[in-house]
Image (cartoon, rainbow, N blue to C red):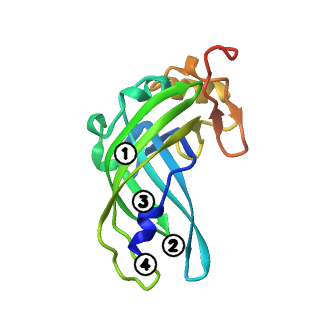
Amino acid sequence: MADLLQALKAADGSGYCHLFENVRTGLSRGVFWSFRFELGSLEASGQDWPTSIEIEWMRWGIRSWRELERCSLDNLMSPSDTECSIYFLGLHQPATPESLAFRHLGGARFLMTLAADLDVEDLAGKRLPRTRRVFEAPMEFDGASVMPGNVAVPKGAPQEATKALGVFLDTRAFEAPVWDGASYRFAPRVEGAGG
């Protein structure tokens, strides 16, 4: 079963950031970044198991997604907020991130490299030996979101969403917000493509 962990390979990556606050818990408003790798499907016990790894709730002191190359686990504003998990054999299981790096490939694409220690259980609930894996693949940055339920921004007020996001990020690096029924989505503005 431990061989399954060695067989995992990063295929597609995606990333986004969102504006969030939680007044009840004392979490101040900020931009939180999340990234995910699809790791393909594993065959175990006669079933195919979709597998992925995600690292989220990261905050950096950057003003644009174009600055992601400067970001790593070493310069997080609040490292204790970061969460990392692997979706393995149908369960979200713990992963401990060890390093994270980005290299710009053009447009809104980056080569993302994530090293993490995986602490997972097999289908019988037996813990496998802790395994360090390094995953690397292109990642498409999908943009930013502002959800009225997460911050005090009214629905039907794209200017207010832009203003709220603009406190933390340079909104000139994004297209105008589009309402998707739940949040304002700000697509990345790619140089040479209308911006």
Labels 4 and 2: the sequence-earlier one: 2
Whether residues under marks 4 and 2 lie with C-beta atoms below 8 angstroms apart, the answer is: yes
C-alpha gap between disc 4 and disc 2: 7 Å
**Can you give x and y, in whole percent of width and height, for residue 119 in the image?**
34, 67
Label 3 environment density (alpha carbons within 10 Å; few <14, some 14–19, many ≥20) = many
**Can you give x and y, in whole percent of width and height, for residue 102 in the image?**
42, 33
Labels 4 and 1: the sequence-earlier one: 1
* Amino acid type, label 3: Ser
Residue that badge 4 annotates: 122
Total label count? 4
Whether residues under marks 1 and 3 lie with C-beta atoms below 8 angstroms apart, the answer is: no
* Amino acid type, label 4: Asp
Residue that badge 1 annotates: 27
From the image, state whether disc 4 or disc 1 is nearer to you: 4
From the image, state whether disc 4 or disc 3 is nearer to you: 4
Q: Which mark is residue 89?
A: 2
Element under label 2? loop
